Amino acid sequence: MISLVVRLDVIPDRREEFLDAITANAASTFAHEPGCLRFDVCRSQSDPDHFVFYEIYSDEAALAAHREAPHFAQWREAVARTVVPGSQVNTVTELVLAHRETDKAEVAS
């Protein structure tokens, strides 16, 4: 599995537009891309304009398909209007270990 961690800062007076855009992108990705297994959008507790996304894809092909999807192109247009230039950092990694809420029951048994 492949994980993608995205960190970025939003232009403060564009935050609502950004939130609308990332909500639409995440929902479309998760609903229409079978290779997307997780798509979390997190906001810093100390900086309301700093966001981190955590996405998991089944493989490199699924991540490539995500980047070719029509909703991703719309997302990139929104990024150009709402994200502080140069602040976005994408890190692609191989997922080595994951824990899920459902795993707790298995450990307790």
Image: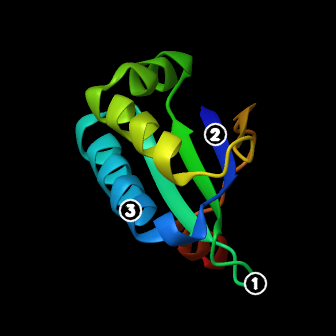
**In the image, what residue type sits under mark 1?**
Ser
Quadrant position of the N terminus in the picture: top right
Q: Is residue 88 rendered to the left or right of residue 76?
A: right
Q: Nearer the viewer, residue 34 or 92?
A: 92
Give the camera-side residue of 87 and 13: 13
Quarter of the image for residue 96 reads: top right
Q: Which mark is residue 74?
A: none
Q: Earlier in the sequence, mark 3 or mark 1?
A: 3
Q: Is residue 102 above or below residue 47?
A: above
Kindly identify which residue carries mark 3.
17
Q: State the image quarter where residue 75 is shown.
A: top left
Q: Amino acid at mark 2?
A: Leu
User: How many angstroms separate mark 2 from mark 3 (CA)?
Assistant: 23 Å
In this picture, residue 96 sits left or right of residue 4? right
Q: Earlier in the sequence, mark 2 or mark 3?
A: 2
**SS for callout 3:** helix
Circles 2 and 3, Cβ within 8 Å, touching? The answer is no
Q: Is residue 77 above or below residue 55?
A: above
Label 3 crowd (10 A; few <14 / some 14-19 / many >=20): some
Which of the two discs, 2 and 1, labels the residue nearer the N terminus? 2
Tell me if I can see residue 34 in this picture. no
Rendering quarter of residue 28: top left
The residue wearing badge 2 is 4
* Residue name at image x 45 percent, y 35 percent: 76
Q: Nearer the viewer, mark 2 or mark 3?
A: 3
Mark 1 residue element: loop
Residue 46 location (% of width, % of height) = 75, 84
Viewer-proximal residue, 10 or 100?
Answer: 10
